[in-house]
Image (cartoon, rainbow, N blue to C red):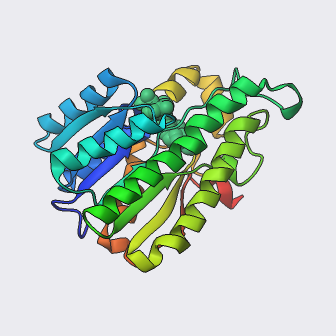
Amino acid sequence: MRGLRTKVAAVTGAGSGIGQAVAERLAEEGCRVAVLDWNGSGAQATVDRIHKAGGEAIAIVADVSDEPQVKSAFEKIVEHFGRLDILVSNAGIFSAERDGKVDDLPKAVWDEIVGVNLTGMYLSCKHGVAAIKATAGKGAVVLTGSPTGMSGCTPANIAYGSSKGGVHGLSRVMAVDHAPEGIRVNVVVPGFTLTPIVRELVADPKVYEWQVQNIPLRRGAEPAEIAGAVAFLASDDASYMTGSFMFVDGGLTAI
Ligand SMILES: NC(=O)c1ccc[n+]([C@@H]2O[C@H](COP(=O)([O-])OP(=O)(O)OC[C@H]3O[C@@H](n4cnc5c(N)ncnc54)[C@H](O)[C@@H]3O)[C@@H](O)[C@H]2O)c1
């Protein structure tokens, strides 16, 4: 893909799943990558995989819902690489057991999920966009959205769906605000993606079959299939795209 070689990219939630695949793909495309996660061993594992493949990466441990940690993380990235061109704001949590319907969801669970998935994206974008503006001047931001932010396709997950709806709103306003500065903002919308926790949940073939019955391609995505779309949105091949939503969902939202 065009324009990724030698760029510096920060990927949040890159210690596992989609974020890990994105970090690896951007490194493969020639980016130098900051692998940000609150799980230090996960972040280091991603860095080790990138190094093994001949790429360049550093691990940064931070909780995206904590502003001092996020601010310091982006300071460390700029100190290490001297610049930031690309932000992939991806860290998120999902809990089918603890999330629920609005009339019986404890506020603490709402605060935790919205705090990571929406406030965490706002904080990563706040300090990430500031770092891009102060160093590279222009660049690209990709946020990880969800079909649950567009429809009620995952019932009894009110905090998660609301947080993702918020991410979609955040991205649209950011796209308009930062277009004049040359910073593009787009959203990748993954469908059912086989990240470690999802693989565990659907280990039983009957549960997997039930999950994929309404997906036209009749299977879940590999994280690398989402990563390709993210790399495209971050690259110069997507130079006329901002405020867009790219669905990588096997046709789920086409129904
Ligand atoms: N897997 C799916 O089916 C699916 C579908 C649509 C959207 N998504 C979204 O994709 C993104 C990645 O999810 P995934 O499936 O790869 O999950 P995952 O659990 O495999 O990876 C999430 C990573 O984010 C990190 N993280 C969580 N909270 C954090 C915090 N407060 N600070 C820093 N790091 C934190 C975790 O440690 C983990 O490494 C999330 O935003 C999720 O909502 C996933």
How far across and how far down the image is residue 51, in percent? 14, 36
| Closer to the camera in the image, 129 or 156 | 129
Query: Residue 183 location, x and y as percent?
Result: 40, 70
What residue lies at 33% left-to-right and 65% top-to-bottom? 133
Nearest the viewer among 120 and 101 is 120
Total marks shown come to 0
Say which of 80 and 219 sits in front. 80
The furthest residue to the left: 54
Which of 171 and 247 lies nearest the eye of the viewer? 171
Q: On the image, which quarter does residue 172 sit in?
A: bottom right
Q: Is residue 228 visible?
A: no
Location of residue 175 with respect to 77 vertically, above or below = below
Q: Where is residue 12, by image quadrant? A: top left
Q: Is residue 58 visible?
A: yes
Position in image of residue 124 (x %, y %)? 45, 47
Q: Which quarter of the rendered picture does the N terminus lie within? A: bottom left
What residue occupies the far front of the structure in this picture? 68
The image quadrant where one finds the C terminus is bottom right
- What is the x, y in percent for residue 252? 64, 52
Query: Which residue extends farthest right?
Result: 103
Q: In this rendering, would 149 be left or right of 137? A: right
Q: Residue at x 64, y 24 (%)?
A: 206
Looking at the image, which residue is at 64% across and 47% down?
Answer: 164
Instruction: Name which residue lies at 84% across and 34% down.
Output: 102
> Does 216 sit above or below residue 237?
above
